[in-house]
Amino acid sequence: MRLTQVFRTFLISDVLVTVASNFAGSQATDAVENHASVSLLYILVSIGVGFAWISALVGLWRFRNWARVVYLGLAGVGPLAHLLAGGGEATGLEEAINALSWLIRGMIIALAYWSPLASKFRPDVRAASQNTSQR
């Protein structure tokens, strides 16, 4: 299996595991009571982070250099925001899925920065490969 296919498999896995984590969190009985008091600011910030995450995934799929930076920033801000918000309660299933999600994110970052695939993110290399393919 080529490294590009492995990388893109991790990107798809990130989406699926994140959706599964959100679904598992919403199915908890206590979660319904906790979500009733969520502020509008929290909702707006969550939507903004969601759009940034989707944009970063699309950029990573297309090997854009800016996407690595955005994805790394979101991966760093996530745990910090969770700690500053006071943590929260989660079911065992939700915590297990979150742990899997962080492992996948770590693999995506490692492949994007420290593998032979990292050269595809550099603009000069990408432009040179496009010029040779057009000839």
Image: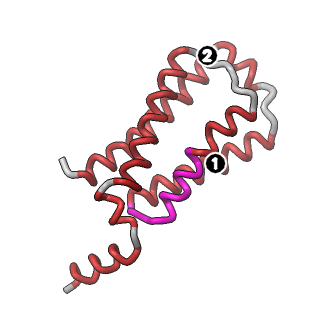
| 64 to 16, vertically: above or below | below
Residues shaded magenta: 62-75
* Residue position marked by numbered label 1 in the rendering: 49
* Lateral position of residue 89 relative to residue 57, left or right: right
Q: Residue at x 27, y 83 (%)?
A: 131
Answer with the quarter of the image where residue 115 lies.
bottom left
Specify the quadrant that holds the C terminus. Answer: bottom left
Direction front: furthest residue: 114
Amino acid at pointer 1 = Val
* Magenta region, main secondary structure: helix
- SS category of the residue bearing label 1: helix
Location of residue 10 in the rendering, given as x and y in whole percent from the top left corner: 36, 43
Q: Quadrant of residue 60?
A: bottom left
Q: Residues within 10 Å of mark 2 (few under 14, many from 20)?
A: some
Q: CA distance from mark 2 to mark 1?
A: 23 Å
Q: Earlier in the sequence, mark 2 or mark 1?
A: 2
Q: What residue appears at the point 33 percent right and 49 percent down from the top-left corner?
A: 8
> Residue at (34%, 73%) from the top-left corner?
126
Relative to 72, does residue 18 appear above or below in the rendering?
above
Q: Residue at x 45, y 33 (%)?
A: 17
Verify whether residue 68 appears in magenta.
yes
Pointer 2: what residue?
28
Task: Identify which amino acid the numbered label 2 is placed on.
Answer: Ala
Q: Position of residue 85 (x, y in %)?
A: 75, 32
